[in-house]
């Protein structure tokens, strides 16, 4: 995003970008918000973020951005209505040029708050969203009312165009990006890996299959466990990395493990605060989601660490994994197909594994870095600012023509 006369806000001042989302706790949406706010500041703009707050709020402040605490996580219609006035007050007081909505409830408030202020409204469409109830599609549709709309994958762009009948010219595909300073095998000291292996009581010389992701049913843990029962699991450990979401799902998985006699193979390790070190322990990383992934951060992080990926062939996986080059894609929800792909990954020889690692790291660095995500988002902001400047110029020209008539 340039702040020169062509693309800047009125009077040549630095542009002001307000991002709105429910909260700033852990997650890909939240992390991306912080990354973009930092990029706006580095580009010479002013970055504001409105949310209910969370542990990432202090990172915004370190980046030179400002957090505005508002009850934007609420789906209560009265609260959402009041949020329109709250956001409109912020837009006017701070001279906001672009409002970037990243979630549906805040987006509805932001859409109406922008009206009559001159602020431009854009959105990032982060998922397919639930459309089971009749009103849900209408509720979701606010994410298609941005101009333009950012889609986090070509899969999501196709979804927007197909389900919501949005013209392709309004959609900009910007893949999520990972921090390759953090997810870089050269930057992970051996001590961190050793400490994590000790914490998880992982025996030496074990081949490790890893499924990272919160314990929710659609992430496909049961599918992986059933596939393990069809493999030679001698000297194999399967690590399920991710926190519980409640509802007894972990107990259900543990019963499945017991029924298949895999108690010594499958290990639930809970949340992990050092995922780069965790990936270093893995021989293969699995994304077994039964529903299509809108993006699939795990697939990119694993490749950034040089690890083979086995992923369900739906959603965005084919955009992220180079098939038979950086990993394998299996037929969604097929235990046999997953078992076959895992067997291929586990049979890699040392030289094949090294070649795959180099291809995987190169794939991420060429296509899925935080820097690329930020640069492409700033390009969209610049496009919006140029359109706004052109609109102002047209209004001024028409006013001049009328005055001279």
Image (cartoon, rainbow, N blue to C red):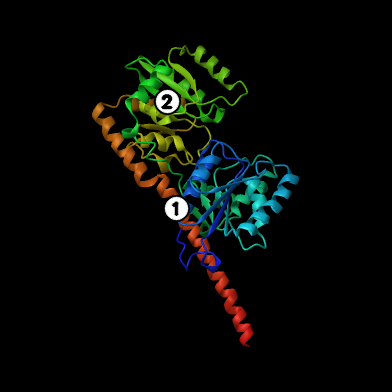
State the SS at label 1: helix
The residue that appears at 52% across and 52% down in the rendered structure is 150
Whole-number angstrom distance, CA of label 1 to CA of label 2: 37 Å
**Residue projecting furthest to the left:** 351
Mark 1 Cα-neighbour bin, 10 Å: few <14, some 14–19, many ≥20: some
In the image, residue 386 sits, relative to residue 327, either above or below, namely below
**Residue projecting furthest to the bottom:** 405
Please state the horizontal and vertical placement of residue 225, each as a whole percent of the image: 47, 21
Residue 42 marker: 1
The image quadrant where one finds the C terminus is bottom right
In primary-sequence order, the first of circles 1 and 2 is 1
Please state the horizontal and vertical placement of residue 295, each as a whole percent of the image: 48, 41
In this rendered view, identify the residue nearer to me: 322 or 5: 5
In the image, residue 152 sits, relative to residue 16, either above or below, namely above
Residue 264 as seen in the image, left or right of residue 390: left
Q: Nearer the viewer, mark 1 or mark 2?
A: 1
Disc 2 target residue: 210
In this rendered view, identify the residue nearer to me: 370 or 249: 370
In this rendered view, identify the residue nearer to me: 5 or 204: 5
Please state the horizontal and vertical placement of residue 171, each as a whole percent of the image: 51, 55
In the image, residue 90 sits, relative to residue 338, either above or below, namely below
């Amino acid at each position: 995003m340039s702040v020169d006369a062509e693309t800047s806000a009125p009077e040549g001042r630095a542009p002001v970008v307000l991002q709105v989302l429910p909260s700033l706790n852990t997650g890909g949406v939240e992390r991306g918000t912080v990354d973009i706010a930092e990029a706006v500041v580095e580009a010479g703009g002013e970055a504001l973020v409105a949310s209910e707050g969370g542990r990432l709020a202090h990172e915004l402040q370190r980046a030179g951005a400002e957090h505005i605490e508002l009850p934007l996580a609420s789906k209560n219609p009265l609260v959402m209505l009041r949020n329109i006035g709250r956001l409109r007050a912020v837009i006017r007081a701070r001279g906001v040029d672009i409002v970037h909505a990243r979630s549906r409830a805040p987006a509805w408030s932001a859409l109406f708050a922008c009206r009559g202020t001159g602020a431009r409204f854009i959105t990032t469409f982060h998922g397919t969203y639930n459309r089971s109830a009749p009103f849900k599609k209408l509720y979701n549709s606010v994410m298609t009312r941005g101009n333009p709309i950012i889609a986090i994958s070509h899969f999501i762009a196709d979804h927007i165009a197909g389900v919501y009948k949005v013209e392709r010219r309004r959609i900009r595909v910007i893949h999520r990006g990972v921090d390759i300073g953090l997810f870089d095998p050269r930057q992970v000291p051996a001590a961190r890996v050793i400490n994590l292996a000790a914490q998880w009581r992982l025996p030496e010389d074990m081949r490790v299959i890893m499924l990272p992701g919160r314990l929710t049913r659609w992430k496909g843990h049961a599918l992986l466990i059933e596939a393990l029962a069809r493999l030679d699991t001698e000297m194999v450990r399967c690590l399920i990395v991710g926190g519980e979401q409640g509802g007894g799902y972990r107990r259900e998985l543990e019963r499945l493990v017991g029924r298949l006699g895999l108690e010594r193979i499958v290990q639930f390790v809970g949340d992990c605060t050092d995922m780069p070190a965790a990936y270093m322990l893995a021989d293969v990383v699995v994304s077994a989601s039964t529903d299509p992934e809108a993006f699939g951060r795990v697939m990119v992080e694993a490749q950034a660490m040089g690890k083979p990926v086995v992923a369900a062939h739906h959603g965005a996986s084919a955009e992220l994994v180079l098939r038979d080059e950086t990993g394998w894609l299996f037929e969604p929800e097929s235990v046999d197909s997953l078992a076959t792909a895992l067997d291929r990954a586990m049979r890699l020889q040392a030289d094949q594994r090294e070649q795959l690692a180099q291809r995987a790291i190169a794939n991420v660095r060429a296509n899925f870095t935080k820097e690329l995500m930020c640069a492409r988002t700033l390009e969209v902001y610049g496009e919006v600012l140029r359109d706004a400047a052109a609109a102002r110029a047209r209004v001024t020209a028409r006013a001049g023509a009328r005055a001279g008539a």
